[in-house]
Image (cartoon, rainbow, N blue to C red):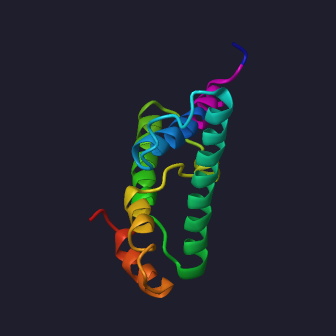
């Protein structure tokens, strides 16, 4: 009961990121069942899914830095949410710490279109450049 409201809210947001990662595992990566009934099997599955999540995020970062492709849908959603939070704080007579929110912003989820592109387009017998060309419009808008 000694945490400030801001620190408590940040803890809640970090927990929410974890929940979203597990939701992505179940919904977008179709991992709804445990691979094993044993504790060791479940632990191995959790580690494997964590590796998959991190590889998706790393590949997404590579695309952003090397070819300038980023998921603008996620960014636009964050900006919309941020504007809503700013307005709510202003209406309540408070000030939202903009720099702090920007520093802490890191989307957890990878879009379903990106995952589908990885599953389908990247696995086709085509060159990497062509696959990247097919990804570019997908990352601009929901199709």
Q: Position of residue 103 (x, y in %)?
A: 64, 52
The secondary structure making up most of the magenta span is: helix
* Image quadrant where residue 17 sits: top right
> Residue shown at 48%/55% (left/top)?
110
- Residue 9 lies in the magenta-colored region: yes
Q: Residue at x 45, y 67 (%)?
A: 118
Q: Check the image and name the residue furthest to the left.
A: 143
Image location (x, y in percent) of residue 82: 46, 47
Provide residue 142's location: percent of width, then percent of height: 30, 62
**Which part of the image, by quadrant, shows the N terminus?**
top right
Residue lying at 61% horizontally and 33% vertically, measured from the top left: 42
Q: Nearer the viewer, residue 141 or 80?
A: 141
Residues in magenta, as a range: 3-14
Residue 99 covered by magenta stretch: no
Q: Residue most toward the top?
A: 1
Can you say which quadrant of the picture contains the C terminus? bottom left
Number of numbered discs visible in the structure rendering: 0
Q: Is residue 21 above or below residue 106?
A: above
Query: In the figure, residue 40 lies in which quadrant?
Result: top right
Q: Nearer the viewer, residue 38 or 96?
A: 38
The residue sitting at 45% across, 30% down in the picture is 92
Q: Tell me, yes or no, if residue 102 can be seen here.
A: no
Residue most toward the right? 2
Query: With 90 as the anchor, is 17 left or right in this view?
Result: right
Give above or below for 28 relative to 56: above
Residue 54, position in %: x, y? Answer: 62, 55
């Amino acid at each position: 009961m000694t945490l400030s409201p801001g620190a408590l809210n940040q803890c809640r947001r970090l927990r929410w990121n974890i929940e979203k990662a597990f939701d992505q595992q179940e919904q977008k990566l179709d991992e709804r069942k445990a691979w094993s009934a044993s504790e060791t099997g479940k632990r191995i599955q959790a580690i494997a899914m964590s590796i998959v999540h991190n590889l998706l995020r790393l590949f997404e970062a590579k695309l952003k830095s090397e070819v300038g492709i980023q998921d603008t849908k996620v960014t636009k959603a964050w900006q919309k949410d941020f504007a809503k939070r700013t307005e709510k704080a202003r209406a309540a007579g408070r000030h939202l710490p903009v720099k702090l929110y920007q520093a802490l912003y890191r989307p957890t989820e990878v879009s379903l279109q990106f995952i589908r592109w990885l599953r389908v387009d990247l696995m086709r017998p085509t060159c990497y450049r062509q696959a990247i060309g097919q990804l570019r419009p997908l990352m601009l808008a929901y199709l």
